[in-house]
Amino acid sequence: MQQHDVAAVIVPSADPHLSEYLPEHWQARAWLSGFTGSAGTLIVGREHAGLWTDSRYFSQAEQQLAGSCIALMKLRVPHTPEHMDWLATHLHEGDVLAVAGDSVSLAGLRAMEGKLGERGVRVRTDLDLPGAVWSDRPALPHARIVEHPIAWACTPRADKLARLRSALRKRGATHHLVSSLDDIAWLTNLRGSDVECNPVFLAHLLVAAEGKATLFAERGKFDDALVAQLAADGVAIAGYAGITGALAELGKHDTLLFDPARVVCTISNAIPADVQRIEAANPSTAFKAVKSPAELDHVREVMRRDGAALAGAFREIEHQLAQGKPLTELDVHRLVHAARAAQPEFVGESFATIAGYQANGALPHYRATQESHSALQAKGLLLIDSGGQYLGGTTDITRVLALGETTAEQRRDATLVLKGMIALSRARFPKGARGPQLDALARAPLWAASCDYGHGTGHGVGYFLNVHEGPQSIRPPVNGGALVALEPGMISSIEPGLYKPGRHGIRHENLAAVVEADRSEFGDFLAFETLTLCPFDRRALEPGLLSPDERAWLDDYHATVRAALSPLLEGADLAWLERHCAPL
């Protein structure tokens, strides 16, 4: 910073594809700060360093930043400025702010320049100062890229590209740049493992409205047969770093469509000034959010297999505790993974399992490690948030298990959260409704008890893709956040929670598909079809707090779970299922 006369550096959680989860090569913020949460921004100034993150990570950040010179700056907490507001206050005319151009979007850079330019602050994206001091920086990943078999992909890539080209022609674009990894994987029917738990691969994609598509990914990741198949579908392979050169070859007669919020400055800077631009969301983002009937059928079968695996894992946890065997949160992760790995078409986890016992459950994104984890006891609550990647879909589920005696407060809290889940799961809403309109339905039972939670209620889920997928979400309104209508075929999580630091945490989570409900004189109405199949632990609940309608919903759900999973289980696992699915 001194060498380049830089007053402050922003180190975001980002890579050249603006992914949520990053390859190690781009985890500079974690390397510099020691904070390993998936969301956070580090700012290093001449005399101050701060880490901005949201409420999901407050406790984790406090622990991981303890003893450092980095201050925790809690987002969306009264009297704590957002990081851009903090910079606007602490930087002065003539100061230079540096941020690596491969970790900030064009839209993000414009926002920075708009906010700080008024104060005479200059933003430089040509300096990667964290990279300059990261001497043992991990190399780029080089995992194989494979075909997503058409039996599960359902729609040929040629059809997906044709649909995309049709959208480009309607917009008047001659070319389209895609840098978001899940969009690329979906469009090409390819999968990889360059990012932990996300079946994607490092690449950029340039699609001509009339002509070929070029996939910029390392040739050594493909076998010859796959390259030939791609060529037959009009997709050529070029080196990963070749995207900037290809963009530079576009001319004044070309019109490029790209999303400035999904393309980093390093890439957008390569677009010649005389190329006409259409700045808009990637059409494929909306396409892949709506699952086809065939994809939903595969997801329903995956949910049966996933539910059967969890029934076996949860039964084994209970059995080993009853036998007095020592178990830790790490063992929970191991048992859940082993049960899923035994299922057909299982590929891997969709995220690292969160197994939080008692107070650790109050950390929404807690992760047990060899250095820091808790032993389980035959009492209290164990929160397990886990998911799997299968050829036929992606799962994400949270359950709270009562390992023995529980307190009245724990049972009350678990029931309040369940009431919120039931309210949203049963909702009927008009076509065109957005996530923020539905979010309050899940919070209302908690609000009635003067409780709340700091995260969103629901996120989209990919199809054998990222466990967090847009464009839709169910959450409170956010300034500048897009309001995307829920459409039939979209999959969303429903996951209200309640967290009491130092005591316990509750989160119940199912995945649900948006489906058509009916039509009335007031228009078309939609509803949710619950996809997840796994019983709730009734021992953690206070049934007296449930209304007759809520009790009926829970009994009906457990009857559905029992009917779906019983053919896949036997012996002790089947007995466990029957016991946990019995009517209230």
Image: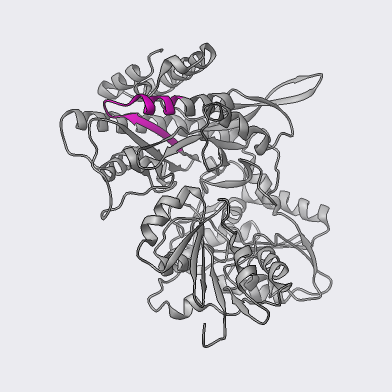
Query: Where the C terminus falls, by quadrant?
Result: top left
Q: Position of residue 422 (x, y in %)?
A: 53, 24
Q: Quadrant of residue 332?
A: top left
Seen from the viewer's position, the closer of residues 272 and 332 is 332
Q: Position of residue 330 (x, y in %)?
A: 28, 46
- The span picked out in magenta is 397-415
Picture residue at 46% right of the left edge, 63% below the top? 71
Residue 241 shows in the view: yes
Q: How is the image coloured?
A: one colour
Residue 399 covered by magenta stretch: yes
- Farthest bottom residue in view: 3
Direction from residue 37 to residue 573 in the image, left or right = left
Picture residue at 55% right of the left edge, 74% below the top? 9
Q: Position of residue 123 (x, y in %)?
A: 65, 76
Seen from the viewer's position, the closer of residues 324 and 150 is 324
Picture residue at 34% right of the left edge, 17% below the top? 578
In the displayed structure, 69 sits above or below 520; it is below
